[in-house]
Image (tube, grey):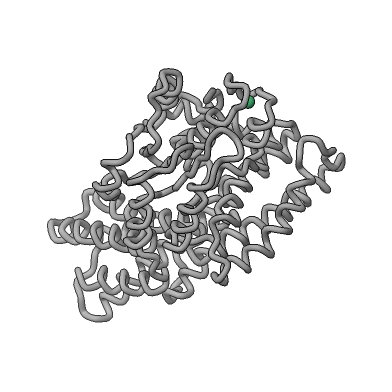
């Protein structure tokens, strides 16, 4: 049980509650990004479904087998997640190792995405559903080729090509069809699904990033939580527990997932992804290796955006920010006169997909401010400006992440707000 969840004390608490039959029907797994919340929820689903009862990872009962492949009909996932970087990391692991563990890693990474499009959750009138259906048929067919019962292509190049083709299809599915916040129609479908008897011992519904539910979806879900059907376990996950409504919090038990030490995170990279961690790397930054926007382009684009804001401010006769200008020059030298519109910036950032790209872009601006402050060159006015900027940047992050506003319009507004502070 929970053998693959490395150094996460929440798994011990869960095991104790399972063994003493005290596991509540509704739970919230709360903790930072990459702290193992979804892994724990999926493992919990397997443990509760195991028809033998021992639920070792090596259990060969049909229920455990289907859960290992994430094909059990008693399991659905709702909510958003950045699946692409993990799929890329798993794809690289499979091409490198070619062993059974790496196959499962890859299959599961893809199915963590696919499970969000389960037919039982879809409103058939929704146009995204029909679009997703065409991708899904293709993805399922390709996934079959990687099943542990099948031979992998012997030729390395052929294997890499098959892995790449499936990865690209999954990325398209995520980009074109995955909701940023759960639509209310999906919650209603899930309520119907939850009331039907399970095929095995118990049904598990996982809602990732439950804090990102909009009002109507949240209210519909609250009704389900108020009268939970028997044989159903709800697992909500969040990295922002404070953003979950008190009415929901009062109906779930929270399991806190700790931020694991760097050594433990390196262990995950080695043992789960069969890769070599780099100095100073954390699990989330390991996944950033696989983002579609390379780090040097991210840095360049951030510098380009900030220098655009500073130039526009000076053109309007506003006071310059000398310490920040110095930090920009030290970070990345821009060719004379290079500039870019908000739309061009967003396009260089792969339209801010996955969301981690947008977060890294904004974190880049914060890092420039920090460099300026550390240089000791910032005067009192500049320090006040940076404080105001920090809040503006946080609002911009929330506008895209939570309110699903287009990154181009958020970026245009961000440039204006930053400039007006000067
Ligand atoms: Zn089993």
The location of residue 376, given as percent across then percent down, is: 21, 49
Name the outermost residue toward the right: 154
Q: Residue at x 53, y 47 (%)?
A: 196
Q: Is residue 67 above or below residue 366?
A: above
Q: Nearer the viewer, residue 212 or 95?
A: 212
Q: Count the marks: how many?
A: 0
Q: Is residue 146 above or below residue 398?
A: above
Ligand 1 shows up in which quadrant of the image? top right
Where residue 250 sits: x, y (%)?
26, 41
Taking the image as shown, residue 364 lies to the left or right of residue 189, namely left
In front of the other: 88 or 30 = 30
Q: Residue at x 33, y 35 (%)?
A: 254
Q: Quadrant of residue 332?
A: bottom left
Indicate the quadrant containing the N terminus: top left, top right, bottom left or bottom right: top right
Residue 365 visible here: no
Q: Position of residue 277 (x, y in %)?
A: 55, 33
Q: Looking at the picture, tell me which residue is in the foreground, 384 or 157.
A: 157
Q: Position of residue 361 (x, y in %)?
A: 42, 58
Q: Is residue 119 left or right of residue 316?
A: right
Q: Nearer the viewer, residue 412 or 106?
A: 106
Question: Quarter-wise, where is residue 380 in the image?
Answer: bottom left
- The residue at 72%/33% (across/down) is 97
Q: Do we see residue 134 in this rendering?
A: yes
Tell me the residue at 60%/57% (across/down).
119
């Amino acid at each position: 049980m929970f053998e693959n969840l490395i150094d996460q004390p929440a798994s011990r608490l869960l095991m104790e509650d399972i063994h003493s039959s005290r596991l509540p029907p509704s739970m919230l797994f709360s903790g930072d990004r990459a702290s193992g919340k979804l892994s724990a929820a999926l493992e919990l689903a397997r443990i509760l479904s195991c028809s033998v009862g021992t639920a070792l990872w090596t259990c060969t009962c049909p229920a455990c087998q289907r859960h290992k492949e994430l094909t059990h009909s008693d399991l659905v996932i709702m909510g958003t997640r950045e699946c692409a970087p993990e799929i890329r990391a798993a794809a690289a692991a499979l091409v490198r190792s070619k062993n059974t563990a790496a196959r499962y890693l890859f299959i599961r990474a893809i199915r963590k995405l696919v499970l969000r499009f389960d037919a039982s959750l879809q409103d058939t009138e929704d146009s995204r559903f029909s679009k997703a259906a065409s991708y899904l048929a293709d993805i399922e067919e390709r996934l079959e080729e990687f099943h542990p019962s099948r031979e992998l292509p012997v030729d390395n190049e052929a294997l890499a090509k098959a892995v790449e083709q499936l990865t690209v299809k999954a990325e398209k599915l995520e980009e074109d069809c995955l909701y940023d916040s759960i639509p209310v129609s999906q919650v209603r479908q899930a309520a119907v699904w939850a009331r039907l008897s399970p095929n095995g011992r118990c049904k598990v519904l996982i809602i990732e990033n439950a804090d990102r539910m909009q009002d109507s979806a949240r209210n519909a879900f609250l009704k389900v939580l108020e009268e939970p059907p028997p044989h159903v376990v709800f697992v909500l996950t969040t990295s922002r527990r404070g953003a979950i409504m008190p009415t929901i919090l009062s109906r779930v038990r929270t399991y806190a997932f700790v931020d694991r030490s760097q050594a433990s995170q390196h262990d995950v990279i080695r043992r789960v992804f069969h890769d070599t961690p780099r100095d100073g790397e954390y699990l989330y930054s390991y996944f950033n290796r696989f983002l579609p926007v390379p780090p040097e382009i991210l840095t360049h684009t951030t510098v380009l955006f900030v220098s655009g804001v500073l130039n526009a401010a000076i053109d309007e006769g506003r006071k310059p920010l000398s310490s920040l200008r110095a930090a920009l020059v030290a970070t990345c030298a821009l060719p004379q006169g290079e500039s870019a519109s908000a739309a061009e910036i967003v396009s260089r950032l792969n339209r801010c997909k996955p969301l981690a790209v947008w977060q890294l872009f904004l974190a880049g601006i914060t890092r420039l401010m920090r460099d300026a402050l550390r240089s000791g060159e910032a005067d009192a006015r500049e320090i006040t400006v940076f404080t105001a900027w920090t809040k503006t940047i946080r609002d911009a992050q929330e506008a895209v992440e939570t309110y699903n506003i287009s990154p181009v319009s958020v970026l245009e507004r961000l440039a204006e707000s930053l400039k007006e502070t000067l």
